[in-house]
Amino acid sequence: MCAVPVETPGVRGRPSGQSGVLSVMKPIVAAILAAFPIVTFAAPDAHGSADSETIVVTATREAVRLTDAVADVSVISRTEIEQAGVTTLPELLSREPGIQYYSNGGPGKASGIFIRGAGVAQSLVLVDGLRFGSATAGGASLEQIPLDQIDHIEIVRGPMSALYGSDAIGGVIQVFTRKAGGKPKLDVFAGYGTYGTQSYTAGASGSAGDFRYSVRAGYDDSLGFSATTSLAKQPYSYDPDKDGYRRTSAGTSLGWAIAEGHDLQFDAQYNKGRNHYDAQDFMGNPFDAYDDHETAVYGLTLKDRLLDSWNSTLRIGRTTDDDLDFGSFSPPSGARYRTIQDQATWQNDFKFDVGMLMLGTDWVNQKAEVEDSYDLSRDIASVFAGWSGHYGAHRIQLNARHDDNSQFGGHTTGSAGWSWEFVQDWQVRLGAASAFRAPTFNDLYYPGFSNPDLKSERSHNYDAAIAWDTKSKGASLTAYRNRVTDMIELDSNYVPQNIGNAKLDGATLAGYLKTDAGYDFSAGLDYLDARDLDTGLRLIRRADWQSMASAGYANDTWRAGAQVQWVGARYDDAANTHRMDAYTLVNLYGQYQLTPMVRLEGRIDNLFDQKYETAWGYGTAGASVFAGVRVMTK
């Protein structure tokens, strides 16, 4: 019996090795309620991590209030991002309920996240509405996106193929970059910390008449620490040297209000970094390996209000993921793994007295180049439709989509969601959805380790939730059941086959509390049963249990807080023999407004210097301090 393959451990472009809701809820709820006394407050519920009046778009492809979303949604605000210091984007996401994370050796290294236990390549990442990631290995290079470029992040847990097509089995993460507009502002930041970490950013934004603008640039550098920690665990790559990284980034947003109801906006974001990692040559000697990684997103969006009841959005864009690897077995000029995704979307939203109708079409051309192995492309043409309505205390959302892939034909997916506010501030939610993931180019064409006859992975998900929300405090309990079939696994010859099946069952207890005195609290508990149904063994790097808690205080001068994250034991191999112990991280942050224009910021991560692993034999940061100063105009 073949085991579920391991997530890609090294350079991102290389081939990788990866009962109903009520029946799930009973043991899960009992376990959670038994454990709940150790949790001071419940974790941010879908509606707790941002103000209840926050507008979100990812869950519906239309603008709705966060409290009106039927799906399991949360938002990470710009304020929370600034409190994260030099934390990487995957680390920041891992502090949200329902998300787990791994990294192969610290900032800049290949990393990944699991949404509700789904694999790295089974969750979709969007940047400003455009698909972002690698079509060779699958997944997205989240570690390459600097936090300074991000305005906010929306996270939707659960299958979303009925809205976005392939890859959205576990959920969708959409990154919204910082936008143009408002009165003219300038801001500059400089910071320094442990491991020789440096970060410098600068930006300007504003508007003039019908035009608006935003320009940002940044530079990050770190001496780092050894990516691997054990010769026994990593016998073919261990090297005790420091593995640093550096990254430059730039972004711009330009907008033009053409006329009332008509708007044109251009967004661009570019990142280039060099990341050193551990490797050995063919004689087993340490080798100073590194890779140069570039990612870019370019998008042009035209929004038109054609009638009072008809809004049209046309978006065209390109995203690229280009990795040039200088490993021990790479040619002198480097081994290239490149993805280009050209995209276009036309979406039409119609408002009626009885609800909202959405009709649209997507087109994507994916091009992939791997070393001298292949240079190929494929087209995906899609049509989608949706209906959402608010009927008294009831809300519904229905979506359907058909994707036609030039390589392996069509897929039709659907979803249905319902919520009912049965008493004031109390709501129940039910949902069902299907999803799929198309094989990557490596799965289909990598010489000697591919299978051109592969089918797409498919999943069917059901979830249920009960939530209480008063806008100042709230709690929720969500349970889900997801079955993934035709999982792509490696056979005994390391050739991918459609022979795997998995179950992803779990629950999240979550909540928050905000006080008029400036204090806020949140915490939560996640249970996940992620298993290979063919072997009964746990999927790699997924903990059965994890919890998080935070407390903060803010006034006109100070902002400070603490975060605690506990992650249970996991296995790093499909045979469940490489056990990684549970760990607890305690982080502190603080900000002090020295003058109206100058703010001091600081953060201590891993306060108690916890020794832990997120990937077998790979290093993690010890106790770390980072401090900086931000100067900004009002």
Image (cartoon, grey):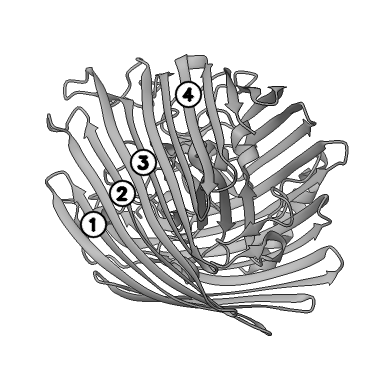
Query: Distance of mark 2 from mark 1, alpha carbons?
Result: 10 Å
* Residue 370 image point, x, y percent: 19, 47
Return the mark for residue 270.
3
- Estimate how packed mark 3 is, as few (under 14), some (14 to 19) or many (20 or more) residues with alpha carbons within 10 Å: many
Left or right: 529 in relation to 467 = left
Query: Distance of mark 1 from mark 3, alpha carbons?
Result: 19 Å
Choose mark 2 or mark 1, whichever is in front.
2
State whether residue 60 is above or below residue 226.
below
For the question of whether residue 459 can be seen, the reply is: no
Q: Sequence order check: which comes first, mark 2 or mark 4?
A: 4
Query: Distance of mark 2 from mark 4, alpha carbons?
Result: 24 Å
Query: Distance of mark 3 from mark 2, alpha carbons?
Result: 9 Å
Amino acid type, callout 2: Thr
The residue shown at (26%, 67%) is: 379
Q: Sequence order check: which comes first, mark 3 or mark 4?
A: 4
Return the mark for residue 320.
2
Left or right: 67 in relation to 455 = right
Q: Sequence order check: which comes first, mark 4 or mark 1?
A: 4
- Quarter occupied by residue 632: top right
Choose mark 3 or mark 2, whichever is in front.
3
Left or right: 624 in relation to 281 = right
Amino acid type, callout 1: Lys
